[in-house]
Image: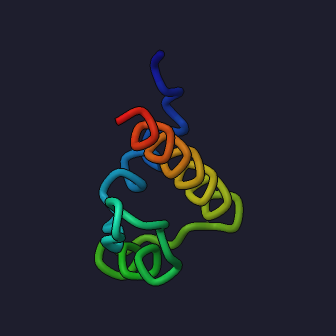
């Protein structure tokens, strides 16, 4: 599957964001990490973009959970 051009920059930003370490791997993306990303890269996400980033994070956390249950 290929990302639509309009969504690619947001996906790339999500992939670059730091995640806090948890006991079983990376933890949930926090507002502090998103704010730090915006400050470091000089961007300002709008409300919709923030909602999409949190949606990406939820999907990533669910995939991580499923992968850890298989091992």
Relative to 1, residue 34 above or below: below
Residue 16 left/right relative to 13: left
Relative to 8, residue 1 above or below: above
Query: Could you tell me residue 20's position as x and y percent?
Result: 34, 74
Relative to 57, residue 4 above or below: above
Which residue: 48% across, 66% down?
Answer: 28
Please state the total of marks drawn on the protein image: 0
Query: Could you tell me residue 7's position as x and y percent?
Result: 53, 39
Quarter where residue 24 is shown: bottom left
Query: Could you tell me residue 2's position as x and y percent?
Result: 45, 19
Which residue: 46% across, 40% down?
Answer: 69
| The C terminus sits in image quarter | top left
Name the residue nearer the viewer: 60 or 49. 60
Residue that lies at the very extreme toward the top in this rendered image: 1
Residue 11 left/right relative to 21: right
Which residue: 56% across, 57% down?
Answer: 53
Quarter where residue 54 is shown: bottom right
* Colour scheme: rainbow
Residue 51 left/right relative to 71: right
């Amino acid at each position: 599957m290929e990302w639509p051009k309009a969504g690619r920059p947001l996906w790339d930003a999500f992939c670059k964001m730091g995640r806090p370490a948890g006991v079983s791997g990376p933890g949930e993306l926090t507002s502090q990490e998103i704010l730090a990303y915006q400050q470091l890269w000089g961007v300002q996400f709008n409300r919709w973009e923030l909602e999409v980033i949190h949606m990406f994070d939820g999907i990533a956390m669910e995939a991580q959970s499923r992968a850890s249950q298989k091992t």
